[in-house]
Amino acid sequence: MADQEMQKLIKRINELAKKAKEEGLSDLEIIERKDLRQKYLKKFRESFRSQVEMMQIFDKEGKEVTPEKVKEVQRKKGLRDD
């Protein structure tokens, strides 16, 4: 579902970008574009944060070297029990 929302945001942002290049935007469309961009960035950051929080990093010898800050977040979310 989140992916569909992102696709809708991207589609509308691109429509407004095309219109801005071709004929310009009304004041309402400029406000809409700003709002859509903020929503897109918020969703992108949430998704990226979630991916980083789920990550585990291992060195060549197979030893886990995940940063402690990430481990702490994982513990708080119940993703680790070490």
Image (cartoon, grey):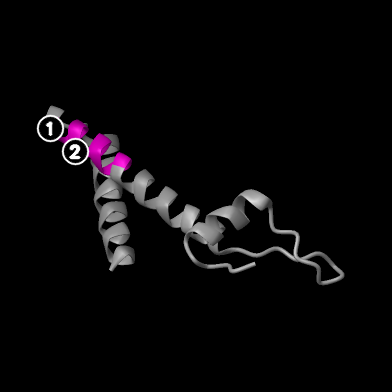
Given the current orientation, which residue lies at the most extreme bottom position? Answer: 62
Given the current orientation, which residue lies at the most extreme front position? Answer: 82
On the image, the x and y values in percent for residue 34 come to 26, 35
- What's the magenta region? 28-38
Q: Which residue is mark 1?
A: 28
Q: Is residue 26 left or right of residue 8?
A: left
At horizontal 19% and vertical 38% (from top left) the residue drawn is: 32
Amino acid type at circle 2 is Glu
Q: Is residue 15 left or right of residue 67?
A: left
Q: Residues within 10 Å of mark 2 (few under 14, many from 20)?
A: some
The reply to whether the magenta stretch includes residue 75 is: no
Q: Are marks 1 and 2 in contact (CB under 8 Å)?
A: yes
Residue 8, quarter of picture? bottom left
Closer-to-camera residue (16/1)? 1
Label 1: element kind: helix
Q: Is residue 68 left or right of residue 72?
A: right
The reply to whether the magenta stretch includes residue 36 is: yes
At horizontal 58% and vertical 54% (from top left) the residue drawn is: 72
Q: Residues within 10 Å of mark 1 (few under 14, many from 20)?
A: few
On the image, the x and y values in percent for residue 50 come to 47, 58
At horizontal 30% and vertical 36% (from top left) the residue drawn is: 21
Q: Which residue is mark 2?
A: 32
